[in-house]
């Protein structure tokens, strides 16, 4: 029988090259063995890195990538919080103290807006309504044409009101409310601290093309906000560890046992507590109530939520509640924030990568890099915004902009096979506006003489979104539509469960597993 030579036979050139010299000394042998051991270590490290990389790649192929898309103020970040509350409640709990800064900022900005509007109206209600020529002058489309690059209206929306003409003789009155003047004086120090709160949250970041005076935060702002407060605390105080320990307080019944001390936020908390009665008086003042009822003073929903509960918000040692305060707290997102959740679906745990994106016009270009490997999109449209206009472009109705944006998503070739879900959001605010008698046809000309009731309005808007989808649906993709109020935790989490199942079915089908 012929013997086959071993891999390291005497005739192997590699073996011969690696054979130690016959004259090798003990010192040379030690150096050689060390070099060989180091080479083996590096080789094994490379092998392990390749193995980990293959494993990460294998797992990433089984992950679900979900994009939350829609214009600014549509409710995307609130929906992200609902996902977080449902699948990673501990992470939301760990952020609670950072949301205290946002709540305070929301309250202070609301008070500032109320006082600014009162000053515009000379601290009185002159008896006119929002239809007066002082606040709104009606224009035809031909008289006030759209300019710039904005696409034509899909709904025939009305041009927004013209700026206030403060030179009009009816715009001023010789008699101002002395009570409001006194309240303005008492609240002056509180509203003057608003820029510092804004800077604490944003880090001084501004976004071009995103409206004036808005505050934006990047991903990870929660930790940075607290860290910045701690740095300021270190500069302002040289107290000993024993004295610093007195700055914390136990909060029984919560997972958050330490109140992080931040000099700026603590100052705002003190001012709010001291100004509690003045804020209540301002919020309940007859002139303020009249301006709100006549839509001369338009506040966001979160403003009313916090001001209606100012006694609790301004209490000492206030901590935001997980469900209500954090869901209503509002701060605009800049860029793209990724959140990863382990979602259990029928006994299988799948990592979901949820991407919450900034929706202002100046930020929408940042969406594109996330399109090529997305599994699903939830497009959020605030159908209550029929009477509102973009901060970035006051000539564009927000419903119109939402439809145009949805058209771009449906027609994008990279997204033709992506599972698509539509949230027609803020239905609670829509109901409230309609119950107050606000006519949709005043802002959406194409609505015509249709009934101004909830069912008719919802059906009208839904039909327009479905029409956009049909016109851009070569692959016969199903559009899952939901009427939502994403601040309603119970209803929203039920919808999230349905969306999760439908996305997972589509994901399995695309992976050829069913």
Image: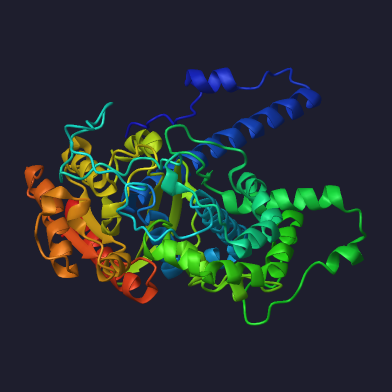
Task: Give the percent coordinates (x, y) of residue 229.
Answer: 72, 52
Q: State the residue in front, 483 or 82.
A: 483
Q: Is residue 510 left or right of residue 120?
A: left
Q: Quadrant of residue 279?
A: bottom right
- On screen, 338 above or below 128? above
Residue 31 as seen in the image, left or right of residue 462 = right
Q: Position of residue 161 (x, y in %)?
A: 32, 44
Q: Residue at x 42, y 55 (%)?
A: 77
Residue drawn 37% across and 44% down? 359
In the image, 188 versus 503, the foreground residue is 188
| Residue 467 showing in the rendered view | yes
Q: Residue most toward the bottom? A: 253
The answer to whether 77 is drawn above or below residue 325 in the figure is: above
Specify the quadrant of the image occupied by residue 267. bottom right
Depth check, front residue: 233 or 32 = 233
Question: Residue at the spot x=66%, y=70% of the render?
Answer: 276
Instruction: Evaluate whether residue 366 shows in this view.
Output: no
Q: How is the image coloured?
A: rainbow
| Quarter of the picture holding the C terminus | bottom left
Q: Is residue 514 above or below residue 307?
A: above
Give the x, y percent position of residue 283.
54, 68
Quadrant into which the N terminus falls: top left
Residue sitting at x 25%, y 49%: 399
Q: How many marks?
A: 0
- Please provide percent x and percent y for residue 259: 71, 67
């Amino acid at each position: 029988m012929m013997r086959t030579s071993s891999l390291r036979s005497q005739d192997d050139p590699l073996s011969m090259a690696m054979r130690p010299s016959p004259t090798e000394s003990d010192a040379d042998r030690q150096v050689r063995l060390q070099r060989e051991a180091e080479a083996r270590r590096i080789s094994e490290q490379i092998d392990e890195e390749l193995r980990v990389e293959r494993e990460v790649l294998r797992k990433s192929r089984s992950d679900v990538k979900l994009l939350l898309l829609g214009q600014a103020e549509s409710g995307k970040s609130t929906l992200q919080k609902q996902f977080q509350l449902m699948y990673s409640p501990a992470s939301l709990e760990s952020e609670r103290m950072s949301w205290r800064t946002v709540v305070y900022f929301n309250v202070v900005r609301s008070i500032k807006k109320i006082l600014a509007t009162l000053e515009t109206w000379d601290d009185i209600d002159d008896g006119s309504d929002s239809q007066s020529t002082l606040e709104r002058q009606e224009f035809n489309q031909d008289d006030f044409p759209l300019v710039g690059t904005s696409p034509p209206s899909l709904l025939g929306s009305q041009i927004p009101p013209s700026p206030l003409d403060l030179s009009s003789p009816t715009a001023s009155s010789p008699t101002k409310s002395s009570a409001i003047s006194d309240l303005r004086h008492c609240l002056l120090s509180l509203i003057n601290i608003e820029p510092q709160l804004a800077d604490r949250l944003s880090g001084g970041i501004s976004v071009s093309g995103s409206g004036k005076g808005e505050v934006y935060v990047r991903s990870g702002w929660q930790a940075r906000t607290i860290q910045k407060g701690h740095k300021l605390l270190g500069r302002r105080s040289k107290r000993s560890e024993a004295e610093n320990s007195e700055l914390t307080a136990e909060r029984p019944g919560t997972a958050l046992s330490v109140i992080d001390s931040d000099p700026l936020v603590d100052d705002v908390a003190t001012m709010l507590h001291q100004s509690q009665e003045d804020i209540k008086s301002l919020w309940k003042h007859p002139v303020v109530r009249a301006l709100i009822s006549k839509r001369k003073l338009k506040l966001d929903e979160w403003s009313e939520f916090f001001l209606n509960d100012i006694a609790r918000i301004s209490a000492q040692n206030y901590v935001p509640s997980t469900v209500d305060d954090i869901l209503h707290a509002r701060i605009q997102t800049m860029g793209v924030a990724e959140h990863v959740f382990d979602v259990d679906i029928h006994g299988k745990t799948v990592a979901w990568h949820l991407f919450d994106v900034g929706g202002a016009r100046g930020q929408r270009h940042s969406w594109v890099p996330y399109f090529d490997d997305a599994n699903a999109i939830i497009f959020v449209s605030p159908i209550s915004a029929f009477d509102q206009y973009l901060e970035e472009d006051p000539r564009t109705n927000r419903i119109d902009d939402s439809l145009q944006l949805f058209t771009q998503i449906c027609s994008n070739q990279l997204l033709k096979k992506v599972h698509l879900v539509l949230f027609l959001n803020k239905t609670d605010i829509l109901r409230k506006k309609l119950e107050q008698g606000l006519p949709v046809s005043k802002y959406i000309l194409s609505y015509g003489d249709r009934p101004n009731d909830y069912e008719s309005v919802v059906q009208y808007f839904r039909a327009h979104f479905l029409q956009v989808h049909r016109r851009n649906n070569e692959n016969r993709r199903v559009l899952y539509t939901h009427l939502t109020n994403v601040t309603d935790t119970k209803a929203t989490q039920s919808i999230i469960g349905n969306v999760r199942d439908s996305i997972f079915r589509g994901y399995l089908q695309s992976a050829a597993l069913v």
